[in-house]
Image (spheres, helix red, strand yellow):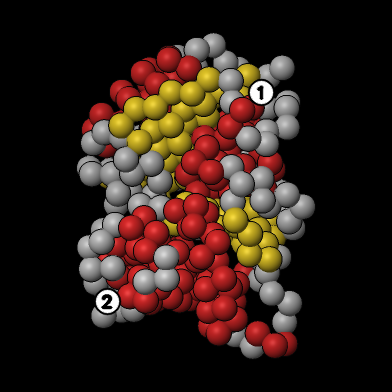
């Protein structure tokens, strides 16, 4: 047994777990320990991560997935959903506080690694993980290796501009994909109504709610068709809130995906799959970083 701690930093919570990385992780029942803390202002992030790591207990490795632009040496350059997140040296500061090596990567990369290794992406040669949460996270795994780019910033698909004159994103630009296709995007399209309410009403056939979900599904499909046109994956794993409403939203997304994809009749389409590891994907993937990451 090899115990590894993985911490996933989200827009609202930090989730830490301990797993046996020698085992086959198939569900939350394979998690040995779990700890949660609210996500603080960036100035307190390292203190929160330190406390969380200590609570997780004795492990062989500690790793963290952090949202935003994360350099190859573990500096959070920017993370629009965490206030104050400019040039936070997560890796070096946490290493100093814990007196041990710490691995740090982008949270989307970590989630992608988890779903490729243990979840819906098993067997994929060229896989994208798309997480539709507070924002939109992305991670790209090719032949078992996470694609990080020259600076570590690859995979920021939530900030593809899909409407240059659209509403302003939390990053400061206008019309980013996550403005429309994130959880916040669904609420915006519903004129402020919570997404879970819209989904429930759509399940009961209320036409206005169905129309909102159709509009949302179209925006989701536009983004994943762009990702497909750029990288030609064989699998796209979709996680976040959509995975909890797959029965009603995924048929819409699949239909709009065909409508928006370049030359759909002349190509093999990627398999659109729902993520299997739920909210634990980022933390599980973080725990895997020491074994699979090439630059952490």
Looking at the rendering, in which quadrant would you find the C terminus?
A: top right
The answer to whether the residue labelled 2 contacts the one labelled 1, judged by CB atoms less than 8 Å apart, is: no
Left or right: residue 173 versus residue 113 is: left
Point 40% across, 21% down: residue: 52
Which residue does the image show at 24% across and 72% down from the upper left?
167
Element type where label 2 sits in the image: loop
Q: Is residue 42 above or below residue 133?
A: above
* Mark drawn on residue 166: 2
Answer with the quarter of the image where residue 285 lies: top right
Q: Where does the N terminus fall, quadrant-wise? A: top right
- Foreground residue, 286 or 118? 118
The secondary structure type at the circle numbered 1 is: strand
Q: Quadrant of residue 289?
A: top right
Q: Position of residue 14 (x, y in %)?
A: 38, 33
Where residue 165 appears, as percent x and y from the top left, is 26, 80
Disc 2/disc 1 C-alpha distance (Å): 45 Å
Count of number-bearing discs: 2
Residue 20: which disc? 1
In the image, taking residue 289 as reference, residue 131 lies left or right, namely: left
Q: Judge whether residue 206 can be spotted in this image.
A: yes
| Horizontal arrangement in the rendering, residue 255 relative to residue 87 (left or right) | right
Q: How far across and how far down the image is residue 231, in percent?
A: 62, 69
């Amino acid at each position: 047994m090899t115990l590894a701690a993985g911490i996933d930093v989200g827009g609202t919570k930090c989730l830490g777990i301990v797993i046996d990385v020698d085992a086959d992780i198939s569900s939350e029942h394979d998690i040995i320990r779990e700890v949660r803390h609210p996500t603080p202002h960036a100035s307190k992030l390292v203190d929160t991560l330190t406390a969380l790591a200590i609570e997780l207990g004795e492990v062989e490795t500690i790793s963290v997935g952090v949202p935003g632009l994360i350099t190859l040496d573990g500096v959070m350059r920017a993370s629009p959903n965490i206030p104050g997140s400019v040039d936070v040296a997560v890796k070096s500061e946490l290493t100093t506080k814990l007196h041990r090596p710490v691995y740090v990567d982008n949270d989307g990369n970590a989630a992608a690694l988890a779903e490729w290794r243990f979840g819906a992406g098993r067997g994929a040669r060229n896989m994208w993980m798309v997480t539709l949460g507070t924002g939109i996270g992305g991670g790209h795994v090719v032949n078992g290796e996470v694609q990080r780019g020259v600076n570590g910033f690859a995979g920021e698909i939530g900030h593809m501009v899909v409407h240059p004159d659209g509403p302003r994103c939390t990053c400061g630009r206008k019309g980013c994909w996550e403005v429309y296709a994130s959880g916040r995007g669904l609420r915006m399209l519903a004129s402020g109504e919570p997404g879970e309410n819209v989904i429930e009403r759509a399940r009961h056939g209320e036409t206005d709610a169905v129309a909102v979900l159709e509009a949302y599904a179209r925006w989701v499909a536009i983004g994943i068709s762009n990702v497909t046109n750029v990288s030609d994956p064989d699998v796209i794993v979709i996680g976040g809130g959509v995975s909890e409403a797959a029965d009603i939203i995924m048929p819409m997304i699949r239909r709009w995906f065909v409508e928006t994809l370049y030359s759909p009749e002349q190509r093999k389409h990627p398999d659109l799959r729902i993520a299997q590891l739920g909210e634990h994907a980022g933390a599980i993937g973080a725990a895997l970083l020491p074994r699979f990451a090439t630059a952490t």
